[in-house]
Amino acid sequence: MYNFEFTKPATIADAVAALGQDDAQALGGGQTLLPTMKQRLASPGTLVSLNAIPEMIGVCVNDVGEVCIGGATTHAVVAREAAASYPALAALASHIGDPAVRNRGTIGGSLANNDPSACYPAAALGSGATIKTNLRDIAADDYFQGMFETALEDGEIITEVRFPVPHKANYQKFVQPASRFALVGVFVAKYADGVRVAVTGASSEGVFRWAEAEAALSANFSKSAVEGLAAPEGAMISDLHGTAEYRAHLVKVMTGRAVAAAG
Amino acid sequence: MPKDHGIGASSKRREDVRFLTGRGRYTDDINLYGQTYVHFLRSDVAHGRLNAVDTSAAEAMPGVIRIFTGKDFEGVGGLPCGWQVTDRHGQPMQEPPHPVLAQGKVRHVGDPIAAIVAETPAQARNAAEAIVLDIEELPAVIDMKQALSPDAPKVHDDLTSNLCYDWGFVEDNKGAVDEAFAKAAHVTTLELVNNRLAPNAMEPRVAVGDYNPGTDDSTLYTTSQNPHVIRLLMGAFVLGIPEHKLRVVAPDVGGGFGSKIFHYAEEAFCTFAAKQIKRPVKWTSSRSEAFISDAHGRDHVTKIELALDGDNNFMAIRTETYANMGAYLSTFAPSIPTWLHGTLMAGNYKTPLIYVNVKAVFTNTVPVDAYRGAGRPEATFQLERLVDKAARELGVDPVDLRRQNFITTFPYATPVAVEYDTGDYNATMDQLLTMIDRDGFDARAAKSKAEGKLRGLGINCYIEACGIAPSALVGQLGARAGLYESATVRVNATGGIVVMTGSHSHGQGHETSFAQVVADMIGVPEAQVEIVHGDTANTPMGMGTYGSRSIAVGGSAMVRATEKIINKAKKIAAHLMEASDSDIELKDGQFTVAGTDKSVAWGDVTLAAYVPHNYPLTELEPGLEETAFYDPNNFTYPAGAYACEVEVDPETGKVTLCSFAAADDFGNVINPMIVSGQVHGGIAQGVGQALLENVSYDENGQLLSASYMDYAMPRADDLPFYQVDHSCVTPCTHNPLGVKGCGEAGAIGSPPAIVNAVIDALHRGGMTHVGHINMPLTPARVWAAMQG
Ligand SMILES: Cc1cc2nc3c(=O)[nH]c(=O)nc-3n(C[C@H](O)[C@H](O)[C@H](O)COP(=O)(O)OP(=O)(O)OC[C@H]3O[C@@H](n4cnc5c(N)ncnc54)[C@H](O)[C@@H]3O)c2cc1C
């Protein structure tokens, strides 16, 4: 790790100001950023911690019934505090990494990083969430722009994520044996106006919506509706943990299981 | 009633108090006055010509003390190889030099090129980034068979090819073996890979070199399983320091599994550099560095065949194995696929004819050497998979086929040059079957099926050769060292006992179980016995701990030394009681004159030895301290039967372990709890090999599984509750404790049980086309195999 400056502002405004300096970078839980710095693959001049900004921490339900999660809320807090309002999301959070990761890592950090194997992107896209930043509101459909790519501008921070709550939802994660990130993860959510299916882990273009499954499930929300589909096409990842063909197959299996588990 | 102390008691591990309360003292806990830190700049290409290493900018960086490159080691020896294998044609193996820092070429990702010594670790690392390398990348050889093709790039330009040796065993049997195959009623053939593993001891390697210009003494603190071996190899072959000027200390060591047997470049470097700069030099490996610098294990590609007669008797076994050596010969690398593998190819079976061929190959990968089991897991895996396949092809019960071919009379001389002294393979199989409720399997399988899962049962046997090893024999086989062990028993004036052993404990619990033996022999509380190990300055020359040898060889030395103590103590007691020493009996720490009520206590005798006011000084030296060296007559042969039940998810290929049972014959057991723990850990590593772990290189020699993000270690929730049993006991006939060793059995016996179980599950699920799946049986591989 190279030397860096560290600041821990108490307001979003101060954080944004601090991030305006050259070489400054936001620090969430550090679960991705710190290992990268230790390997000397990242060398920010200043780390701006978002962990002491009260308005960015916590889970609540707003007037229109959305579950609102502060951008610096840890996975452990989401697992606990969203359990009643959005059980599928809480369950997803409770299976990220290990207790240490869940007690440090944040939803904002996960979404900003947009790892192609991360879990939260599937929940955000699968729920049609709104990513709220210090500058604007971004619809999940516009936010994810490929592996590690998002709509965020330099210095822009995720202050909150708003999830419309579906009638039914479930996330199925098939773990990569070493990292236990998602080899394939599928988030299925049934809303009044249709079903959303978001897939993580599988595609080299990052999290994506599986349109065929959404159509089939919107017509008939049952496992059998998925069984009739061909495995999704697209640029599936092929690596030492699984071929593209295997991942495509798993997408279908996990989608079916998510539907069955959603009830 | 289980014993509550001494031999056979499950005494609690005394070392755990310090390990679990943070009071252990590991090498990284050692920090010396004036200490400096070294960072190794390592090759990031697998194969390349090292045209230039420009350190000029780096030398000017803050905190840099000195930068070393291969040039600094030109007059210094390379890392020696401790075993010379002779090939099928009577020629010695090809043995390339192994420089401490790369000279001329780099040969694997991780090969050290330069060593930067600085005031802080960060300064050393910063300076490494300022070194300018001119490396001309060369095509790399990774695949062993490709490495042997005539136009393959050579890892070592001065060798005739990438073939280290082509070994045939027993070469004279080859003709008869081929003939038996020609006559066989049935031949079963299996091609398989024994996957390459990274050892991953919990404590990464560390070395601290120190030099005292006032005395010209060098000291190396290192994470080693055998400090005396390191002192000998490094002193005599690399740095030219005589033993009396070199001390090697291996304090608490957090696991080794073989990877800390070997003499590594970093150890030689720190010792050498400390003398050059006259300040201590410390290196602490990171986990990432461990993946590319600790010797790996396994990595065999094998074809094995079994010839059976019309009655299903095994007639002959023939194997052809390619064994990866990596880029250089690690300390014991050549012996692993030969003498620790070929000699075990008979397994538990009376196959009269066996021929083993092994081609050892250099590739542009990390060197490969012993890893828990070392050669024996490879032998067991191929044989036990093969027998299982044969049973399936012949439509016979796999247990019956094994039993029919078991060796049942002992001693038994195998056709692969070893003699099993004792064993009872039916007894361990019987014991296993009482543990696993085989009759209930169908009901369990039906229940799994109702839940959409395929259930399978795998059973196998294993045998291993431990208690390594008779020195004269291994000398004939090419070992450049003896394999005895030593112990000094020092009795203090007030009766306390200190045992100094040449073996080393790095998780095995020697401090507890060795004390149990000595305490039991003398009849004093275990707490009165202290075990000292790990420092060449205060222990007798010993060969260290590996190959499940410590209780069998080191324990035997300790018994011999304790016998000497008892003999002398009896003479002192006889003097004190004015009796003849042949009449003296020792029981529960009391010396009595047989048939009388005259007695003196242990403490009276030990005090007399050191305060010899009333003492037979004309006949006996004062003091009570004895040393013994023990050289074994034979290997020991632990054996057993293992079983595993799995569920396979037919939709994803994911394997779940439902149960695992191990019935072992370890001969006499000193501490059953510690033995169970050894088996538990061994099985966990076997599960790792069978289901999870795999060192994976791409075709350019880049390590793909270079961190825990991609190298899957077993975790607690991957494992079922095990049933382990070691109640079947056929004591070893040739060592004083009747012990065989238990350290590697779990890792040797478990992989075939797991793979057999998965194949069984797939066959029961109708996928009879699946003959074999190569480890690790990841969901992706099992699913692909199911697709056909
Ligand atoms: C062992 C381990 C296992 C893991 N397993 C999983 C898993 O199973 N599933 C999974 O999804 N993830 C997993 N993770 C990743 C984990 O969820 C991390 O928490 C997450 O990827 C990053 O979140 P963070 O808060 O730690 O962000 P940091 O590491 O602090 O930051 C990551 C990036 O996001 C930026 N950033 C941080 N916060 C914000 C913000 N509010 N607005 C804008 N940018 C921001 C940073 O500048 C940086 O670029 C694992 C991590 C580890 C170490």
Image: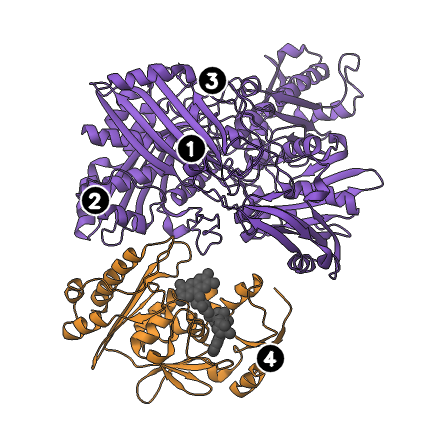
Chain colours: A orange, B purple
Callouts 3 and 2 on one subunit: yes
Image coords of residue B320 (percent x, y) = 38, 28
Instruction: Give the class, few, some or many, for how many residues have Cα within 10 Å of label 4's Cα (few <14, many ≥20).
Output: few
Q: Residue at x 51, y 28 (%)?
A: B335
Give the residue type at disc 3. Thr
Where disc 4 sits, the SS reads loop
**Badge 1 is on which residue?**
B322
Q: CA distance from mark 3 to mark 2?
A: 42 Å
**Badge 2 is on which residue?**
B444
Q: CA distance from mark 4 to mark 1?
A: 56 Å
Determine whether, in the image, residue B669 is placed left or right of residue B83: left
Q: CA distance from mark 3 to mark 1?
A: 35 Å
Q: CA distance from mark 4 to mark 3?
A: 76 Å
Chain of residue at mark 4: A
Chain of residue at mark 3: B
In the image, is residue B775 above or below residue B733? Answer: below
Query: From where the camera sits, is residue B724 visible?
Result: no
Callouts 3 and 1 on one subunit: yes
Determine whether, in the image, residue B437 is placed left or right of residue B329: left
Q: In the rendered structure, which disc, 3 or 1, sits on the residue that comes first in sequence?
A: 1
Give the residue type at disc 2. Arg
Determine whether, in the image, residue A118 is placed left or right of residue B80: left
**Badge 4 is on which residue?**
A22
Where disc 1 sits, the SS reads strand
Callouts 4 and 1 on one subunit: no
Mark 3 residue's CB less than 8 Å from ligand 1: no
**Badge 3 is on which residue?**
B733
Chain of residue at mark 1: B
Image coords of residue B370 (percent x, y) = 51, 35
Check residue B355 in the rendering and tell me which mark sits there, or answer none. none
Query: From where the camera sits, is residue B159 visible?
Result: yes
User: Is the C terminus of chain A in the top left, top right, bottom left or bottom right quadrant?
Assistant: bottom left
